[in-house]
Amino acid sequence: MSDNFKAILISRDEEKKQSVDVVELGDDDLMDGNVTIAIEATTVNYKDGLAITGKSPIIQRWPMIPGIDLAGTVISSSHGEYQKGDKVILNGWGIGQTHYGAYAAHARVNGDWLVPLPEGINPLDSMAIGTAGYTAMLCIMALENHGITPDRGPVIVTGAAGGVGSVAISILSKLGYYVIASTGRSSEADYLRELGAADIIDRNELSEPGRPLGKERWAGGVDAVGSHTLANLLSQTEYGGAIAACGLAQGFDLPATVMPFILRGVSLLGIDSVNAPKELRLEAWQRLARDLDLEKLANLSTMIGFNDIIGAAHDIIDGKIRGRVVVDMTADG
Ligand code: NDP
């Protein structure tokens, strides 16, 4: 029997009122799975913020240990591909929503959900990337598959100072794209330029209802915002261009017209990280190891300990977090 460890547990009472507590659990309390992991690092994503604040119905099984991303070392395994001592990453697949997640010292999961930690990336780096960074990579791969290469013209990134946005800017600029960053935080202009943004625009330019077709301004885009912003991105995309849509920070609505699609051949590429197939994950993580500057990654990350997770979850929903938060699970904070 292993020692008890600390975990964040979200529970609901009979009136469906949510409470968030730090509790002591043991390995026997974990859910079924064929690989048990000692968690070394995790992160706080927007979705984790939604779960802990209860702002959106992210959790689908009660009680729940939140945390949708983890990195650590295998303690025990009956899965053919993993052995004790292997370093692994897990993003999504319902952890923190339907299966106990990352905000505990240990996790027991289905080995099919795991990705081996790529060479050259340590567990803390991998969580500086996290679901946000891996989703940014999926967006960029989708744009590339659509033929949006740097010579096609500028690309726009919305929610620029957030997690997906920051990593997207960093990778796109390293790949040679001319990156336009859309942000509501003019105070972060220097930070965005350091990441590689060539041009910065105020997000208010895009967040109000716009015309069905506008001046063609970009060949492609990564959108973390949705709603009118996504509609305006589409209406200002060059002929044959594409926008990869992954987020809803402004809203989940899409008040757009079909005009960009039928008059300019523009494409809208949907990006899901949670249930993305394993081959795509492996490719995305290999690309991240190659195309993301780890020094820039360190600049866009803030390190916290376990005790700071709940506060950071509230901050991300209040739009107070810049870039990525990394949780060192070996530190209390
Ligand atoms: P962050 O909170 O780190 O970033 C979101 C950014 O969006 C903010 O930093 C802000 O950027 C901008 N923003 C916030 N509110 C508004 C608003 N009302 N109008 C316009 N812009 C706004 O979150 P993440 O980067 O982690 O995630 C971004 C989005 O992507 C979220 O909606 C998240 O749920 C989604 N997501 C989806 C995934 C998928 O699989 N499809 C996976 C990962 C994330 P700024 O301050 O620069 O304006």
Image (spheres, grey):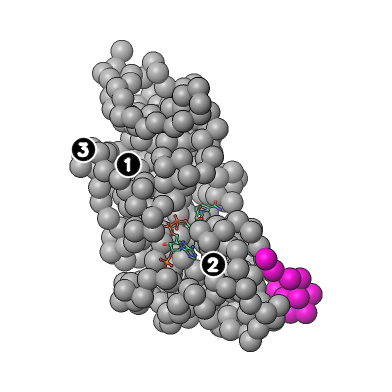
Tag 2 secondary structure: strand
For the C terminus, give its image quadrant. Answer: top left
Q: Earlier in the sequence, mark 3 or mark 1?
A: 1
The span shown in magenta is: 255-266
Q: Amino acid at mark 1?
A: Ile
Q: Amino acid at mark 2?
A: Val
Label 1: how many residues lie within 10 Å, few (<14), some (14-19) or many (20+)?
some
Percent position of residue 279, x then y: 58, 48
Mark identifier at residue 310: 1
Disc 2 from disc 1: Cα separation:
28 Å
Disc 3 from disc 2: Cα separation:
35 Å
- In the rendered structure, are the residues bearing label 3 and label 2 in contact, judged by CB atoms less than 8 Å apart? no
Q: Amino acid at mark 3?
A: Asp
Q: Is residue 264 magenta?
A: yes
Tag 3 secondary structure: loop
Asked whether 101 or 146 is in front, the reply is 101
Residue found at x 42% / y 71%: 184
Mark identifier at residue 222: 2
Residue found at x 41% / y 40%: 52
Residue found at x 58% / y 80%: 218
- In this picture, residue 222 sits left or right of residue 147: left
State whether residue 261 appears in this view.
Answer: no
Mark identifier at residue 22: none
Q: Earlier in the sequence, mark 2 or mark 1?
A: 2
Q: Earlier in the sequence, mark 3 or mark 2?
A: 2
